[in-house]
Image: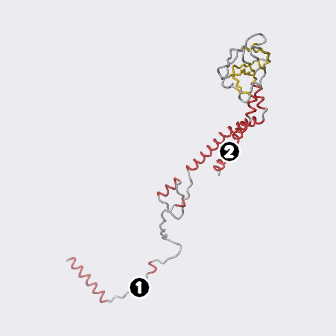
Amino acid sequence: MAEKSGRSWARLITIVAAGLLTISLISFVTSMDAVEDILDPEKLNIGVVDAGDSLDLKLQSGRTYTLLRIVDNVGEDALGNDLKIVNSEGNEMILDAPTWMHPPRTGESGTVIYDTIATYSNEKTGTFTFENLNSTSNLYVVDDHEGDLAATREPVLLMASFSCCFGMLLLPIAGVVQLLTRKKQDRALGNPIITMPQNTIPTTDELFLIRQGVMKPEDAKGVKPVKEVPPPFTNTHQATPIENKVEQPLERKNPREVQVADSDEEDWKAWDTG
């Protein structure tokens, strides 16, 4: 009963996890337009530096800023050596190279491609000057923290994220429940309780098949037991042969026959002793 309940729980958890992942996938598909708006540097930025120009921007401490340009070919046209960030004291800041966490972005339904050229993590709040040394391409400065906040304001995208997280969490739980249930079942099968038939004696082959689970004990034909020999003593009184013997009256021998017999015995003794 416990094993059946364990399998039911594992099946139920798996179904719930699959349902949550399905909801997550559908939600992500339906929220693609909102995701594109959040990732579009044209719509979500803290400033756009025109080609060959500079712009003062106030940056918050502890945040990462992504710097992007519109390109024709990803990874070829965008270069990080054509811009500078200078603080209020005139010191140039060190820029970080983009990683896989800063992929290219699209805008205007995918017709415009933005490639990341550098990132900058600010340690102190202050005003910084962005100098765009490129004479043909604008520089887009995006606050990644603002993008995360914008994503949390989208109900469909939020539901998709929670469904995905809970679905991925329930799948290993279902696997653990299924594994524990299977181990209990294997231990139970290792020591099966076999009820042998009462009216027959199973043969050796039948006992082996029953032990392997191929044959049910009640299906064993076996050999019928031999009728038992009744016990030598019972509670009922039975007459013994001695009791059944009828006493015969003693025959009276003829005195002459007795005398002849005695004479023959004496003759035998005399012959034997010579």
Query: Marks 1 and 2: which is nearer the front?
Result: 2
- Residue indicated by mark 2: 15
How many C-alpha atoms fall within 10 Å of the one at disc 2: few (<14), some, or many (≥20)? some
Q: Position of residue 79 (x, y in %)?
A: 67, 17
Tell me which corner region of the image, top left, top right, bottom left or bottom right, holds residue 253.
bottom left
Disc sitting over residue 248 in the figure: 1
Q: Position of residue 222 (x, y in %)?
A: 49, 62
Q: Is residue 238 left or right of residue 18?
A: left
- Position of residue 266 relative to residue 212, above or below, is below
Sequence-first disc among 1 and 2: 2
Disc sitting over residue 176 in the figure: none
Q: Count the marks: how many? A: 2
Check disc 2 and report its element: helix, strand or loop: helix
How many C-alpha atoms fall within 10 Å of the one at disc 1: few (<14), some, or many (≥20)? few
Q: Position of residue 5 (x, y in %)?
A: 66, 49
Observer-nearest residue: 171 or 104?
104
- Position of residue 155 relative to residue 223, above or below, is above
- Position of residue 95 relative to residue 177, above or below, is above
Residue drawn at x 78%, y 36% as measured from the top left: 155
Query: Which residue, as the protein is rendered here, is positioned at the far left?
Result: 274
Check disc 1 and report its element: helix, strand or loop: loop
Q: Is residue 234 left or right of residue 182?
A: left
Observer-nearest residue: 133 or 130?
133
**Which amino acid is tagged 2?**
Ile
**Which amino acid is tagged 1?**
Gln
